Amino acid sequence: MQKRKISILGSTGSIGTQALDIIESSGRYELFALTCNSRIDDIVRQTEKFSPRFVVVSDETKYSALKSALSHTTTKVLSGMSGLVEVVTHPEVDIVLTSVVGNIGLVPTIEAIKAGKIIALANKETLVTAGEIIMPLARAHGSTILPVDSEHSAIFQCLNGESGDTVDKILLTASGGAFRDFTREEITHKKAIEALKHPNWSMGQKITIDSATLMNKGLEFIEAKWLFDVAIDQIEVLVHPQSIIHSMVQFKDHSIMAQLGVPDMRVPIIYALDYPKRFPNNVKPLDFMTLNALTFSKPDLSRFPCLGIAIDSLRKGGVAPTVMNAANEVLVDAYLKDQIGFYDISDSIQKVMAEFETISHPNIEQILWADQETRERVSHLLKR
Ligand code: NAD
Ligand code: MG
């Protein structure tokens, strides 16, 4: 069997390294390109292990250092956005795993779609900021988008063989994050270091903070709307602290399909890469006898306003989700550096969104402009 060639955007991150782990044990893929932002020590180690054709460092100031560190290999070194685009559009590439964090993934994802690649999409910010453009673009270029996010992988699996008009609603499950059981007063004083202690999943820092604010579920709500083409009122969020049911679909006959498993991202990653096939892997199976209970509750939007803000941005449409997402990225970064408090994230997103001029049905240039403009406005707000 010919191995499929894969480029990984963000191979040094949490998703990227888990992908490498399961790709290596599967033996079914050839690594065409690995990419990172600036941590070149990690990508040097990965290159020595996997011998990809290309590596890309996004930060151009690290290019020379990376090139000399890899001078003993045959791997070609590229840098910057042009390097990222080159390795995802190369004619030999079959699949692109987009596992960078943040809106930086938008441009390379669009270029990979235009080149007709299969996209295994982990980078949810891309769909949040430009879902209205991405999905039709993928259809027009015959590019398949396969979700990697565990909830969306679950929904996608539940929809296997079903037609869209049979769906009544999507039940999106949420762990509730690190502060699920604290009062608003207690959460007010929580620092990033505590928010980073996620109960069930080990993930990158940005998404772990997003989980604590429930913004992650807001981003996933928007991601689900675009991926599965449902109305806003057809998506319901359920807090399910055990993270065993990864999401569900309720059909018109009120039959419900759920996808379950231990919380391990390697399962949805390899499902997207191998789709529509399934192969054995070495992820441990779920043992029902060790489960005490599966519980569910409504999310509390007063303690976790970010979820409501994200859904509002989707209702508003236009550039509102782009502005919401960009503001969140800057504010989460500030929270991680202990420059602001927990509720400054939601308060400032709302403030910036309220002041931002409406642009309906934006094109990519307008989305990129709104993203950049928002970052500047939030940075300005933070300085004050
Ligand atoms: P992470 O912070 O661990 O890794 C991010 C990766 O992106 C790194 O390889 C980094 O080098 C790269 N990167 C960062 N900034 C970049 C830039 N400016 N240019 C080029 N590359 C850059 O993040 P993660 O947890 O792996 O998450 C990646 C994406 O997957 C996010 O969109 C996240 O929401 C999504 N996701 C993650 C998980 C998870 O379990 N970690 C689950 C579902 C979805
Ligand atoms: Mg998820």
Image (cartoon, helix red, strand yellow):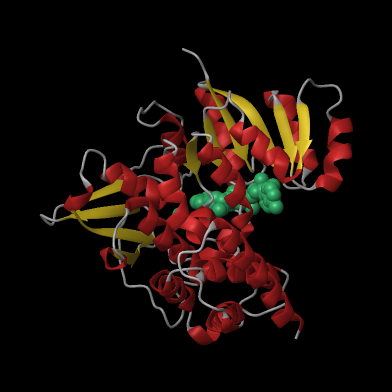
The vertical placement of 157 against 246, above or below, is: above
Question: Could you say which quadrant of the image residue 83 lies in?
Answer: top right
Percent x, y of residue 140: 41, 41
Residue 296 sits above or below residue 110 on the image = below
**Is residue 89 visible in this depiction of the protein?**
yes
Report which quarter residue 261 is drawn in.
Answer: top left
Residue 318 locus on image (x, y percent): 47, 68
Residue shown at 60%/35% (left/top)? 88
256 is higher (above) or lower (below) than 179: above
Q: Is residue 327 left or right of residue 274?
A: right
Image position of 166 with respect to 118: above or below: below
Q: How many marks?
A: 0
Report the residue at 75% width, 26% height from top.
Answer: 48
Front-lying residue, 133 or 176: 133
Residue ID at (46%, 54%): 133
Q: Position of residue 138 (x, y in %)?
A: 44, 43
Q: Residue at the far top: name it.
A: 1
- Quick one: quadrant of the C terminus? bottom right
Residue 283 in sight in this render: no
Is residue 231 rendered to the left or right of residue 115? left
In this view, which residue lies farthest toward the left?
253
Q: In this view of the protein, which residue sits in the foreground, 356 or 215?
A: 356
**Is residue 159 found left or right of 142 in the rendered image?**
left
Residue 35 in the image, given as x and y percentages of width and height? 69, 39
